Amino acid sequence: MKKGALIGCGFFAQNHLHAWQELSGVEISALCDRDTARLRGTADRFNIERTYADAAELLNAEELDFVDIATTVQTHRPLVELAATSGVNIICQKPFADTMEDAQAMTRAADDAGVTLMVHENFRWQSAIRAVKDVLDSGRIGNPFWGRVSFRSAYDVYSGQPYLATDDRFIIQDLGIHILDIARFLFGDARSIAASTKRVNPLIKAEDVATMMLVHETGVTSIVDCSYASLLPRENFPESLLEVDGHTGSLRLLPGYQLVIQSADGTEQQDVSPPLLPWAERPWHNIQESVRNIQEHFIDCLNASASPETSGKDNLKTLELVEAAYLSATDGNRTIQLTGS
Ligand code: NAD
Ligand code: 89Y
């Protein structure tokens, strides 16, 4: 049985706790939040007795295999470093860090302490995205040469996550990070990126639209586009739509989780809808299922002493894309060459 504690009992952490409860071989034995009302409410809701307002106190007092950090980005570095020096394994929400320097320091801290550090980069764990990856790996459409990962919506994300309207960065750091990670997952690491951003909603501080072009090491060129300012006939939140063209066919992941595969054998349509877990709520069930899947992967990795797919080190490459996209957008949309961090 792996014993964990959750730090940060806010909006999204409730999903983590539902998912931990559903998984076997893991138990969340303590909670921490500096907001005592949130801490109490969450402890009551999930029937968890031991609570702390301070993460250092939690780590001193509890015998843990891991901590699950579900705070916003500003506190990730101090909390990851604290957990690493306490010798516990770590799963930390995205965005992993505000700067590359912070992210590199966090991966170093985990390496020095010999603990596992995984980023909760969950969109690639959605069942529809996994289904697309399986088709690509099967060779049914041949070698991909072009792709598009698209997330366009007018869903009100600000009421649940008010900081999204006031932070200095918005859509690339918050949502685009997932969409860029999906592009890496499907098409491989990127060699270069160019980006353009826009703020359409006058009531928020930062960009709510971003369009990016990536050239991948595999030779794929991809478009990654995100918007929270797109009022469409059908609201697709939170679906990522996909287009991939390969040498012998193509695929499209269309609204409503419909996967259409065109190959030399003809056209095939599959319904790749996520399951509605007992605690999940539409339309979030797609994201909620991926939370369950990524947390299961984390526990599997701890049990097998294996490196997680979205380890801290792996996530440096996704973060480098985020940083390069902002640099490109503020510097005449120029193409930024990536180092691979
Ligand atoms: P939130 O503000 O609702 O919750 C964060 C909680 O952390 C708050 O209750 C706050 O009091 C607590 N906290 C902050 N610093 C702390 C500290 N040092 N010690 C103890 N408690 C502390 O935020 P949220 O909307 O739940 O977002 C949390 C993270 O989850 C963000 O990084 C966000 O990007 C991410 N998120 C991920 C997904 C996803 O699909 N992966 C979806 C939504 C949000
Ligand atoms: O914070 C974001 C995330 O990670 O997924 C969707 C979201 O909640 C709003 O953009």
Image (cartoon, rainbow, N blue to C red):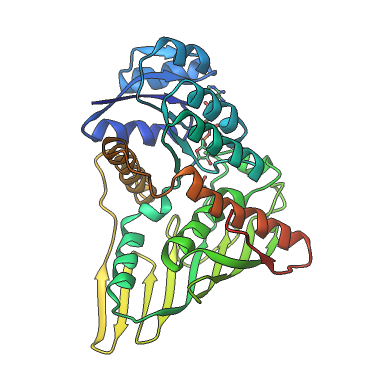
Q: Quadrant of residue 26?
A: top left
- Residue at 46% over, 65% down: 188
**Vertical side of 228 occupied by 212: above or below:** below
Residue 235, visible in the rendered structure: no
Q: Position of residue 253 (x, y in %)?
A: 37, 70
Residue at the limit of the structure toward the right, as seen here: 331
The number of numbered badges drawn on the structure is 0
**Vertical side of 264 occupied by 194: above or below:** above
**Vertical side of 267 occupied by 107: above or below:** above
Q: Nearer the viewer, residue 95 or 204?
A: 95
Q: Position of residue 268 (x, y in %)?
A: 25, 79
Q: Quadrant of residue 327?
A: bottom right
In the picture, which quadrant includes the N terminus? top left
Q: Is residue 142 left or right of residue 111?
A: left
Q: Position of residue 127 (x, y in %)?
A: 31, 57
Residue 181, visible in the rendered structure: yes
Q: Is residue 257 left or right of residue 146?
A: left
- Residue at 55% over, 39% down: 161
Q: Position of residue 254 (x, y in %)?
A: 38, 70
**Vertical side of 327 occupied by 74: above or below:** above
Q: Nearer the viewer, residue 241 or 45?
A: 241
